[in-house]
Image (spheres, rainbow, N blue to C red):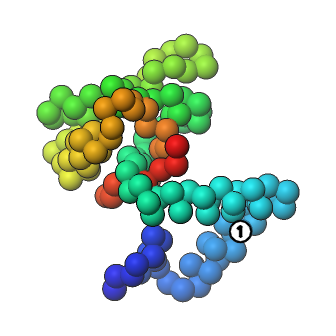
Amino acid sequence: MESDSDESFSCTPEEIVKAASTATSNLLPEKSRGQYLKEYDLFMKWRAEKQVALIFGIAGALRREELYKMTLEDINDTGTVLIITIPDSKTHIQRRFTVIVEITQKNVNLIEIYRDIKPSGQRTLKVITFSYNFETVIAKPK
């Protein structure tokens, strides 16, 4: 059961989808909801044109600034382990996360595809989302 939508809930019961949608819509305060929706629409339009972004997740408590400052050089592929370094933290303590390549080889291949697609002058990732199973290369706004 495939759809053209970016969000697919094919295995999720309909009542759960409705409850999640209601909960999500109630997360944002009224004042910032309009701004969020405007930014989201801008992102979706940009994504449709550019089609280049690396979105992956890391299990752990991180600040958004730490994720924002990551570059492609912070992802090191040793062949058997993917080492992700958080470069500049508020506490000035460098942290590292590892992903075992054997289990997630498809995902590691996506990082290589992203490095090939990314223009050589651009080093930063800029957009990172929290989802351990990353399976697609999609767009991001500048």
Q: Quadrant of residue 58?
A: top left
The residue drawn where x is 45% and y is 63% is 48
Q: How many marks?
A: 1
Place of residue 111 in the rendered image (x, y in percent of width and height, measured from the top left): 27, 43
Going by the numbered disc 1, the residue's amino acid type is Ser
Place of residue 135 in the rendered image (x, y in percent of width and height, measured from the top left): 31, 58
Q: Nearer the viewer, residue 93 or 41?
A: 41
- Classify 10 Å Cα crowding around label 1: few (below 14), some (14-19), many (20 and above): few
The residue drawn where x is 14% and y is 33% is 79
Place of residue 126 in the rendered image (x, y in percent of width and height, measured from the top left): 49, 38
Q: Nearer the viewer, residue 126 or 56?
A: 126
Q: Nearer the viewer, residue 41 or 54?
A: 41
Q: Judge left or right: residue 19 versus residue 73.
A: right
The residue drawn where x is 34% and y is 82% is 2
Which residue, given by chain and number where applicable, does mark 1 sit on? 25
For the question of whether residue 56 can be seen, the reply is: yes
Place of residue 125 in the rendered image (x, y in percent of width and height, measured from the top left): 43, 37
Vertical placement of residue 100 versus 87, above or below: below
The residue drawn where x is 56% and y is 78% is 17
Q: Judge left or right: residue 135 versus residue 102.
A: right
Quadrant including the N terminus: bottom left
Vertical placement of residue 103 versus 120, above or below: below
Vertical placement of residue 121 versus 45, above or below: above
